[in-house]
Image: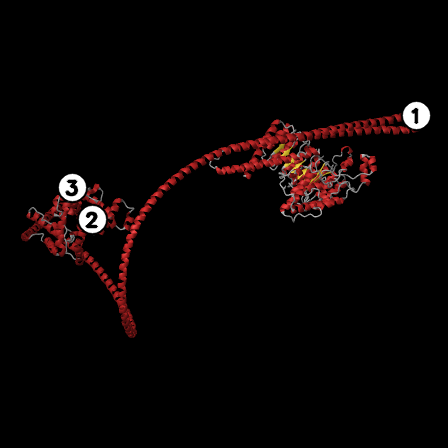
């Protein structure tokens, strides 16, 4: 644990002092330096240059930038140190070049396209993420976070929190070192919070649109303990309240955080009628039937467009609840229920809901222990529903009969562009036929697109 | 697992980006195509580059799909394994729970047994028994504990196994992830290289196309420049030539103009001198005129003054005269009014008189008709009586002759007996022109009799004109026409008919347009007849005679035209030659163009005749009476039916007969006496007989 925590927060490190050995520097030994466009034969530099250099040196105390001429401004920006404190630079400098230098200095080469091609946004988001990821409850001062907020507020639209540290335990707890006991200990006399409290942050970030949270610790190595990966009810409560306060949020992703039925219900209760939420992702959790029922309720009372419940523990009843909501829903475009245990009961329920729904475009039902009956209903859906563009049924034992039924259904459909039937034992003939139909659909689609472009 | 989930996102993004790039490139290509298409709209055939682009696009899509499938295959397999594992775990867990429950149940039983045995042990008082019991208890407990330990051990074993499995899974997943990464990299590399290949190919095809276009365009360009050069050369040469020509002509013009200029200058100089002289002269006359005009002005002024005086006088006179004029106007208006009234009165009188006159005329006509009728009736009655008397007389005469005289009786000539009615003007026997035409135009089948009729009619001049004045001229004319008729009588009826038809066609302008419209529904013959009628009325032809005249005129005319060279005289005297030729006279001679000319001259002739005839008609109407000079003779002839000699015979006969009568009377008396004597005799004889018979009886 100490290893993870010992990662010192980012601090300014000045470049090493230039050595005075002139002979070592080849530039000093040359009379003409052709590769440097600013080199001049004049021994005495221009006063303006000297002034600018002075500005650069004392930028922290006296940030003078906007009053400079454009050419001088470029000169200054090119030479500014990347280690200047953020409070000086963040609201003053908008030059991408400077921020690019900062990012590359701190994190090396990165793909800026993921940040809307804005180096500044990238720097601020990653800066804030770093602060949160290294936040230790009861140890780190919350003011560290709050100080960063006014600087980052205008530039942060996404937070991708890849770890959240738990509080440091008392020595006695360390001694006991027993998973079962420590859990009870925490609930009795633990620290004030189990993880970072988003409540102090989310309502202040006025432009936040995406939040990705994982309640776990990265790279714990041999210091593994179960309670490092604990998403407690209290955490959930705090998070839910914080989410409710953040009205600009569009995408919420909570991965691998052991979200069970209770927590799911709590989250959903706070997300009901959220004004802007469009995407909810609860992959790799422990959501069961009751949680699924809560999600169904959320479907009816929000404008979700994408719902991903990949790798959970939803079974037939939960699927029925979601299907019930889906039949009435008019906003959902994508539904991902892969790697659950819907079975034929859930599969049929979802398929029958699709007979009424006419907005869903993508449906993923891979690895759900479904078989032929589901395929029969789905083929009816394919005949009737002309909105569905992509459907995945991989890793379900549909059998060759199910394949034939599906083939018949697909042959009446002209909108389906993708149909994943890997590892479903549907028989090669059916698979080939379905693939051909889909190829035709794709060609038609491409043609219409080309026509529309022309 | 997070790696499994997170990593595919990057490739997906990259794929999306790549897709965008492909779309953008294809769009750019299309735009180029569009530009090209604008350049050469005429030859819009599927080009090589386009085909190449489409082929590449299809190949890339296939590659992309296959690669994506290859990468996602791993994920799908992992999903499948995971679901399998879960199912197994679920099953194993279920088994485990069952096992645990069984175990718990059995241990509970054992535990109950132990507790039961405790109570039993408490009852035991013998220490050995107790020890035995305790031992058995201990054994039982040990058994339980052993069972439990065994279970624990098993579970621990399972835990270890699942740990191993977990580790194995982890390793497997790590491998999977590595595989995915590897495949993704391969895929990226492969896609990149194939994209590069495709790009090169597409570029090559475009390059090729461009080269072809370039060479083609260059060739065209060179051709055009060559043409242009030629044209320019030609133009320059032409221009040079023209320039030389123009220079020459300019030179010529210059010389001629100079000469002309000199001449004109000389002439103008002389003109100027002359004009100057004239100017001097005019100046002198001007001086003179000015003086004259001054004098005139003075005179005029004086006259003007006089004129003003006269004008005032005249004005006074004008006012006076105007008064007179106004008074006269009033008078005139009055006069006019009066005269108008008078005029009106007179016109009324006139109309009334006219009316009266018309009435009178009507009455007169009426009475004349009545008189004529009455006269006829009386005449008829008398004639009848006379005729009866005559017949009676004749009968008597016949009787006398046959019975008394015993002579054969011969009937005296009695032409008048066949006559009936009053003696009449026989002019009505003449046919009207119209009838003639109708007859002529009748079908050929009936023509012979017609012809006969016609001949008779035209030949028969048997009419008498009552008018004493017109009689001689008429009769002479009639003779003439008769003669002419004889001439033309030989003219075939066909020819006449043809002539009439010709006339009908050529003189259509004489017919009223209204009539033509009305005629249109009728038959052709009928139409022709009606037209002829109207033409005749227009020409003033009324009788058959006139028609004949017309025909003759035309005949002559044409003969004149045709035989002008033969110098045949065109008079009635020269009738011999037309008569001969009339038979041969064919329709060839009938030149429709001459018809109008002939008609014109005919009307000129004919109208003169009519002028002469017209008063005759008027006189005839006025006289109206009939000739009674022959009546007496007529009657007398009737009365003289028995000649004077015969009357004498009758008288002698009468006396003889009277004598005979007396003789006969005497005889008659004698016969009667004898008869009465005979009767007396018979009676007596009877009485005797009776007497004789009665005595016997008695």
Q: In terms of secondary structure, where does tag 2 sit?
A: helix
Query: Which of these two is toward me, B608 or B212?
Result: B212
Q: Callout 1: few (<14), some (14-19), or many (20+) C-alpha neighbours within 10 Å? A: few
The secondary element bearing badge 1 is classed as helix
Query: Residue B121, percent across and down?
Result: 91, 28
Rendered position, B59 above or below A167: above
Which residue is at the front of the view, B139 or A281? A281
Between tags 3 and 1, which lies in front?
Answer: 1
- For residue B471, which quarter of the picture? bottom left
- The residue nearer to you, when weighing B466 against B585, is B585
- Is circle 3 on the same chain as circle 1? yes
Point out the frontmost of discs 2 and 3: 2
* Mark 2 surroundings within 10 Å by alpha-carbon count, few (fewer than 14), some (14 through 19), many (20 or more): few
Q: State which quarter of the image contains the N terminus of chain A.
A: top right
Between discs 2 and 3, the one toward the N terminus:
3
Q: Earlier in the sequence, mark 1 or mark 2?
A: 1
Residue at mark 3: chain:
B
Can the viewer see residue B76 in this picture?
A: no
Q: Quadrant of residue A325?
A: top right
Q: Chain of mark 2?
A: B
* Residue receiving disc 3: B583
Mark 1, residue position: B131
- Residue A42 placement: quadrant: top right
In percent of width and height, residue B412 lies at: 9, 49
């Amino acid at each position: 644990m100490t290893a993870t925590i010992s990662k010192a927060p980012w601090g300014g490190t000045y470049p090493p002092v230039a050595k005075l050995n002139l002979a070592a520097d080849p530039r000093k030994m040359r009379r003409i330096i052709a590769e440097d466009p600013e080199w001049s034969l004049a021994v005495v530099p221009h006063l303006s240059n000297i002034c600018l250099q002075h500005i650069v040196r004392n930028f922290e105390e006296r940030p003078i930038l906007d009053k400079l001429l454009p050419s001088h401004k470029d000169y200054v920006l090119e030479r500014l140190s990347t280690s200047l404190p953020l409070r000086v630079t963040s609201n003053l400098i908008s030059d991408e070049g400077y921020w690019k230098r900062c990012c590359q200095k701190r994190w090396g080469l990165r793909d800026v396209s993921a940040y809307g091609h804005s180096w500044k946004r990238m720097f601020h988001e990653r800066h804030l993420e770093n602060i949160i990821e290294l936040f230790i409850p009861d140890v780190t001062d919350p003011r560290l976070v709050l100080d960063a907020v006014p600087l980052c507020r205008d530039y942060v639209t996404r937070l991708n929190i890849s770890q959240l540290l738990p509080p440091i335990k008392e020595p006695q707890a360390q001694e006991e070192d027993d998973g079962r006991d420590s859990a009870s200990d925490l609930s009795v006399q633990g620290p004030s919070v189990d993880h970072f409290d988003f409540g102090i942050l989310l309502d202040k970030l006025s432009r936040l649109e995406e939040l990705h949270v994982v309640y776990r610790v990265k790279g714990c190595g041999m210091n593994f303990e179960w309670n490092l990966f604990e998403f407690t009810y209290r955490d959930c409560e705090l998070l839910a309240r914080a989410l409710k306060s953040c009205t600009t949020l569009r995408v919420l992703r909570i991965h691998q955080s052991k979200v069970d039925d209770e927590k799911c219900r709590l989250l959903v209760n706070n997300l009901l009628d959220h004004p802007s939420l469009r995407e909810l992702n609860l992959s790799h959790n422990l959501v069961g039937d009751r949680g699924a029922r809560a999600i169904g309720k959320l479907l009816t009372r929000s404008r979700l467009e994408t719902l991903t419940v990949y790798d959970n523990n939803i079974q037939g009843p939960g699927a029925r609840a979601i299907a019930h909501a889906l039949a009435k829903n008019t906003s959902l475009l994508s539904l991902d229920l892969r790697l659950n245990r819907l079975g034929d009961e859930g599969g049929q329920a979802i398929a029958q809901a699709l007979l009424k729904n006419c907005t869903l475009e993508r449906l993923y039902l891979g690895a759900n222990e479904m078989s032929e009956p589901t395929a029969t209903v789905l083929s009816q859906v394919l005949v009737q529903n002309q909105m569905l563009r992509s459907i995945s049924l991989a890793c379900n034992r549909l059998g060759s009969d199910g394949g034939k039924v599906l083939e018949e259904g697909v042959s009446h459909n002209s909108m389906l562009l993708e149909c994943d039937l890997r590892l479903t034992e549907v028989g090669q003939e059916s698979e080939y036929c379905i693939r051909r139909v889909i190829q035709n659909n794709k060609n038609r689609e491409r043609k219409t697109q080309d026509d529309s472009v022309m | 697992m997070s790696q499994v989930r997170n990593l595919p996102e990057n490739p997906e993004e990259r794929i999306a980006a790549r897709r965008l790039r492909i779309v953008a490139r294809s769009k750019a290509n299309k735009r180029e195509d569009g530009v090209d298409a604008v350049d050469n709209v005429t030859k819009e055939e599927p080009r090589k580059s386009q085909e190449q682009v489409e082929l590449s696009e299809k190949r890339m899509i296939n590659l992309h799909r296959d690669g994506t499938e290859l990468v996602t295959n791993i994920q799908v397999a992992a999903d499948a394994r995971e679901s399998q594992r879960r199912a197994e775990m679920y099953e194993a867990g279920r088994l485990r729970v069952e096992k645990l429950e069984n175990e718990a149940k059995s241990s509970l039983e054992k535990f109950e047994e132990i507790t039961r045995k405790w109570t039993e042990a408490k009852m035991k008082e013998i220490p050995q028994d107790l020890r035995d019991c305790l031992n058995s208890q201990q054994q039982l407990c040990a058994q339980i504990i052993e069972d439990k330990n065994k279970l624990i051990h098993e579970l621990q074993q399972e835990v270890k196994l699942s740990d191993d499995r977990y580790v194995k899974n982890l390793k497997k997943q790590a491998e999977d992830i590595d595989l995915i990464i590897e495949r993704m990299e391969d895929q990226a590399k492969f896609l990149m290289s194939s994209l590069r290949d495709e790009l090169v190919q597409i570029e090559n095809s475009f390059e090729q196309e461009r080269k072809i276009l370039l060479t083609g365009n260059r060739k065209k360009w060179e051709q055009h420049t060559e043409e242009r050069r030629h044209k320019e050369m030609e133009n320059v040469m032409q221009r040079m030539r023209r320039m030389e020509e123009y220079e020459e002509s300019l030179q010529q013009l210059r010389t001629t103009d100079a000469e002309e200029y000199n001449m004109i200058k000389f002439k103008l100089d002389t003109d100027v001198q002359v004009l100057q002289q004239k100017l001097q002269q005019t100046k002198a006359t001007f001086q003179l005129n000015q003086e004259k005009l001054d004098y005139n002005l003075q005179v005029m002024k004086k006259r003007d003054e006089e004129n003003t005086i006269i004008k005032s006088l005249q004005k006074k006179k004008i006012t006076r005269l105007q008064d007179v004029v106004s008074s006269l106007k009033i008078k005139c208006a009055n006069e006019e009014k009066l005269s108008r009234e008078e005029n009106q009165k007179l016109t009324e009188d006139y109309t009334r008189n006219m009316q009266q006159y018309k009435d009178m005329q009507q009455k007169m006509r009426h009475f004349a008709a009545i008189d004529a009728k009455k006269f006829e009736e009386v005449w008829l009655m008398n004639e009848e009586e006379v005729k009866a008397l005559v017949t009676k007389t004749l009968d008597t005469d016949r009787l006398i002759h046959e019975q008394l005289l015993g002579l054969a009786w011969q009937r005296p000539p009695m032409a008048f007996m066949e006559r009936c009615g009053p003696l009449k003007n026989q002019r009505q026997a003449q046919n009207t022109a119209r009838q003639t035409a109708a007859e002529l135009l009748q079908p050929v089948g009936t023509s012979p009799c017609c012809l006969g009729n016609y001949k008779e009619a035209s030949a028969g001049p048997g009419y008498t004109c009552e008018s004493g004045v017109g009689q001689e001229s008429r009769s002479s004319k009639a003779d003439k026409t008769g003669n002419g008729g004889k001439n033309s009588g030989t003219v075939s009826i066909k020819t006449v008919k043809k002539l009439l038809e010709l006339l009908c066609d050529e003189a259509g302008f004489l017919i009223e347009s209204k009539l033509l419209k009305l005629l249109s529904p009728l038959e052709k013959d009928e139409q022709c007849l009606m037209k002829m009628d109207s033409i005749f009325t227009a020409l003033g032809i009324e009788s058959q005679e006139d028609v004949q005249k017309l025909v003759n005129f035309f005949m002559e005319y044409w003969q004149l035209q045709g035989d002008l060279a033969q110098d045949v005289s065109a008079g009635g005297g020269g009738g011999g030659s037309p008569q001969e030729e009339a038979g041969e006279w064919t329709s060839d001679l009938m030149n429709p163009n001459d018809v109008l000319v002939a008609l014109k001259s005919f009307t000129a002739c004919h109208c003169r005749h009519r002028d002469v005839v017209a008063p005759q008609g008027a006189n005839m109407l006025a006289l109206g009476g009939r000739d009674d000079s022959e009546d007496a003779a007529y009657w007398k002839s009737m009365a003289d039916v028995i000649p004077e000699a015969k009357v004498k015979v009758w008288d002698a006969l009468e006396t003889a007969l009277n004598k005979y009568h007396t003789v006969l009377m005497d005889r008659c008396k004698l016969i009667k006496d004898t008869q009465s004597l005979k009767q007396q005799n018979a009676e007596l004889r009877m009485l005797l007989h009776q007497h004789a018979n009665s005595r016997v009886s008695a």
